[in-house]
């Protein structure tokens, strides 16, 4: 009964809470699955214990502290069908070491516009993980183009004063819009993109802003020997057209149109 109340309070099902420890910055909740011996393949409850393992899932913060669920799991071998299985955790996010509730918390937090790094710090996961969560929820980002344009614009999203637009300079198409223009947020965004994809960018177009120059140097160093000249085309919020005669003094960048 006591355990039922605890799991109800915590909002986690399928487990029995076996202990809670609290430190200055985080809370660890120990638990183990209940009814985990039933084979999901044939429904048999005759199973051998194969081994034990511990899974740690990050959960949504509680009382401004990071929360970890430390789950003691058992793998079984079914005596009837031979399958090896372990009890699924209904509250675990598939393929991630975190709970669905933490993902919901992150998504909900975007109602209040704030920096991604602040949110990452609050929930105790990396900014890259934040962007991965967001990427799962919205329309997939388009692949980085050969001619990559980055620019800022003054938006009206109610939080950050400026947003960042990313565009394809050849197709004249916006490929993504980022909620801020802060260097740390841009760094988190681009570090979440596979390096091979980033290497596909040949020309990097931006204004002289130091933040964008930093993005170029950190994430698109291969574009460093392109020199851009004035171009007459505009695509969405970002204008671009360029030539690519080499110049060591003019790394990627950098024209204002
Ligand atoms: Zn079975």
Image (spheres, rainbow, N blue to C red):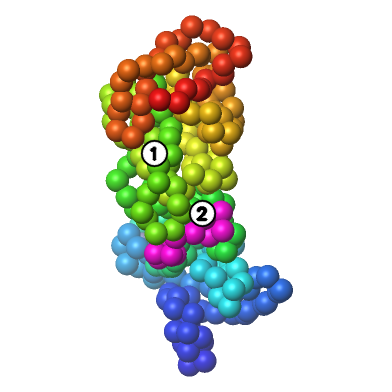
In the shown orientation, is residue 203 left or right of residue 62? left
Which of the two residues, 152 or 26, is positioned nearer the viewer here?
152
* Residue at point 37%, 49% (across, down): 155
Residue 165: mark = 1
Helix, strand or loop at mark 2? helix
In the rendered structure, which disc, 1 or 2, sits on the residue that comes first in sequence? 2
Residue 7: x percent and y percent? 48, 82
> What is the tally of numbered marks visible in this picture?
2
Q: Residue furthest bottom?
A: 1
Which quadrant would residue 68 be assigned to in this image?
bottom right
Using the rendered image of the protein, determine whether residue 79 is visible from the camera's viewpoint: no
Which of the two residues, 202 or 74, is positioned nearer the viewer here?
202
- On the image, numbered disc 2 is attached to which residue? 116
Q: Is residue 183 above or below residue 209?
A: below
Helix, strand or loop at mark 1? strand
Using the rendered image of the protein, determine whether residue 114 is visible from the camera's viewpoint: yes
Q: Residue furthest right?
A: 24
Residue 122 belongs to magenta span: no
Q: Classify the position of ligand 1 by quadrant: top left, top right, bottom left or bottom right.
A: bottom left
* Residue at point 45%, 52% (across, down): 161
């Amino acid at each position: 009964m006591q355990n039922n109340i605890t799991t109800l309070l915590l909002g986690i099902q399928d487990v029995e809470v076996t202990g809670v420890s609290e430190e200055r910055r985080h809370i660890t909740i120990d638990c183990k699955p209940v009814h985990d011996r039933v084979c999901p393949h044939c429904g048999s409850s005759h199973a051998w214990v194969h081994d034990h393992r511990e899974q740690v899932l990050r959960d949504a913060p509680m009382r401004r502290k990071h929360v970890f669920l430390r789950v003691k799991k058992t793998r079984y071998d079914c005596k009837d069908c031979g399958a090896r299985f372990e009890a699924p955790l209904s509250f675990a996010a598939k393929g991630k070491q975190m709970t669905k509730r933490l993902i919901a918390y992150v998504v909900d937090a975007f109602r209040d516009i704030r920096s991604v790094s602040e949110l990452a710090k609050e929930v105790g996961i990396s900014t890259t993980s934040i962007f991965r969560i967001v990427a799962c929820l919205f329309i997939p980002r388009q692949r980085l183009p050969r001619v990559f344009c980055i620019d800022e614009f003054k938006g009206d999203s109610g939080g950050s004063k400026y947003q960042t637009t990313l565009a394809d300079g050849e197709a004249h198409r916006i490929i993504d819009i980022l909620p801020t223009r802060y260097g740390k947020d841009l760094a988190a965004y681009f570090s979440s993109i596979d390096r091979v994809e980033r290497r596909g960018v040949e020309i990097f177009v931006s204004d002289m802003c130091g933040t964008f120059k930093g993005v170029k140097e950190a994430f698109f160093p291969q574009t460093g020997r392109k020199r851009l000249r004035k171009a007459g085309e505009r695509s969405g919020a970002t204008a671009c057209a360029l030539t690519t005669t080499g110049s060591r003094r003019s790394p990627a960048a950098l024209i204002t149109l």
